[in-house]
Amino acid sequence: MTQVIAGQRRRYGRLGDLLVRWSFMLPTIVLLMAVLAYPIFYTLEISFSSFDMSIFGAGEWVGWDNYETVLQDYRFWDSLRVTLIYLVIALPLQVALGFGIAFLINAEWGGRGLIRALFIIPMVVAPVVAGGIWRMILDPLWGIMNYFLGLVGLGPFDWFGDPNLAMATIIIIDTWRWTPFIVLIATAALLALPKDVFEAAKIDGANWWAMLWSVALPLLVPIIAATFVIRWLGAVKLFDIVLASTYGGPGKATSVINLFIYEEAFRSFHFAESAAMVMIVLVLTMVLTGLFLRGSRKLEESF
Amino acid sequence: MTAARTAAQRRPVALRKIRGNHVRIVAGVSISLLFLFPIFWMVLTSFKQQVDIFTTPPTLFFTPTLATYVEYLQRADIVRRLLNTVIVAVGAGVLSIIVGAMSGYALARIKLRGAHTFGVLILLSRGVPPIALAVPMFLVARKMGLADKHITLILAYCTFLIPYVMWLMRSFFVSLPRELEESAMIDGCTRYGAFFKIIVPISMPGLLSTLIFSMILAWEELLFALVLTNRYASTIPVAIAGIAGDTVNGANWAALTAVGTITVVPVVIFALLVQKWLIQGLADGATKG
């Protein structure tokens, strides 16, 4: 390798080689600076300014005013609460379901590959389409879900009219859209488990519970943690499904933070307050993402 | 211990295993059908006439019609939106695969002081909610006269596609043997030569499946399209959000399901074409990312 580097240096000179090496990284850095970092800094500026509609940009400096307004707005807290409820229920549910289904469909038979391929389909349905078709399926009057539930004597349910049911609706749609994704990750993880460890445990007389709890689970913990982090990265972006199904309703019962900020910015034109909310949410999600990444690394090391 | 006894001991275990396997197969198949039902119902509804859609009980048997497809595929706004979605998805996919694969390679193979910090920052950026970017992008685009243009949407999609491609391709390149480009460079290849002539060709399957998945992500995106485009560059998810949220005219389920089917079918075909790589990529993303 040293020989190679020396060869490259001779060709370009020291500086030239450095340039060539960085040129692989530079397009990404430059592009993301322009479209990722710059917008965030611009939002930061607006969050500390009044919004000047005439120039459509940051007006005069107002200090922490926007943050105070936002933090005193009960609707902001409400939408954070709604988002938290969604995350706390949907994430563990989807990870548990995903690994459970993966265990079922990993049974060895000829159709295994086909079943696995079928799980790709819901995963690539556009979230906005998912929201739309579930809105049809769950329609209180004509929807097929209430018809099916009626056959077994349940309902009719007003999926979009009742605040709690509306939240359940969002979680159902989101779970339908995202569980297949976890199933596919989990299937690959289960297939990659070392077979000999299970053979050894079986010879030692372990029952299936012991196999699951003491052998499979410790091996799976790092992957479950990683899956959780990946799913978290997607879940904080929840927007399309809500927009197409409940539109935050009834009232504000399913108005998750992304939808609430969207409404405040693009329907009410409260750009300064929206910018403050964006910064708060940004800090919250970055801190939590960092913690989760770190936690999953730790788990990976300790198991 | 005699051989006969061992066999007798073994049989019940084997039987139980087979029965357990059957239960798992039946459960697995039923669950996957359950997951496919909403899509089946969408496609079915898209071939119904208005009278067959609003029936109690919901009907499985009806005279199919292509009327909704014909009507919507002739509407100028839907056709233009489809075209826009293709342009933006291909543009964003190609741009981010080139840029992202290069930086993924840099992170995997090239010694760069400080590059790792950038890598971690970019990884963290995957936790940035898109609304945090949509607000300032909207303002900047308006100020710079970039609103309602394809390029604006393409650049906006790079914010989530480049980090995705970079980390996926990084783990792909890490798994390649180092000797490949080392021997090429000893033979006098430049770094670019080693990358484009040696690494890229053998990574083609991985690159292609990542490209296809990136295009799918761009194809489905709603928020940026909603905020950054208006008439000219608007995409198909915006149209679907409009149809789904149309409370004035009531639920136009025929339109919703027909346009929904048009949106979903090409994506499903592409995804199934690269399914093997897609699953591999997902698994690598989870375990090595």
Image (cartoon, coloured by chain):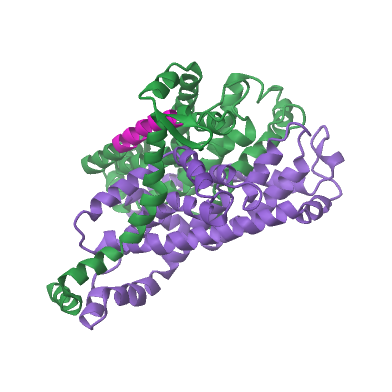
A299 on left or right of B248:
left
The residue that appears at 67% across and 21% down in the rendered structure is A161
Q: Nearer the viewer, residue B86 or B137?
A: B137
Q: Nearer the viewer, residue A144 or B111?
A: B111
- Magenta segment, principal secondary structure? helix
Q: Position of residue B61 (x, y in %)?
A: 83, 45
Up-down relation of residue A26 to residue A238 (above or below): below
Q: Is residue B105 magenta?
A: no
Q: Nearer the viewer, residue A123 or A280?
A: A280
Magenta residues? A275-292
Q: Position of residue A139 (x, y in %)?
A: 71, 30
B227 on left or right of B285:
right
Assign the C terminus of chain A to one quadrant of the image: top left
Q: Position of residue B127 (x, y in %)?
A: 39, 40
Indicate the chain coloured green by its letter.
A
Q: Position of residue B7 (x, y in %)?
A: 39, 51
The residue that appears at 69% across and 38% down in the rendered structure is B244
Up-down relation of residue B105 to residue A247 (above or below): below
Hue of chain B? purple
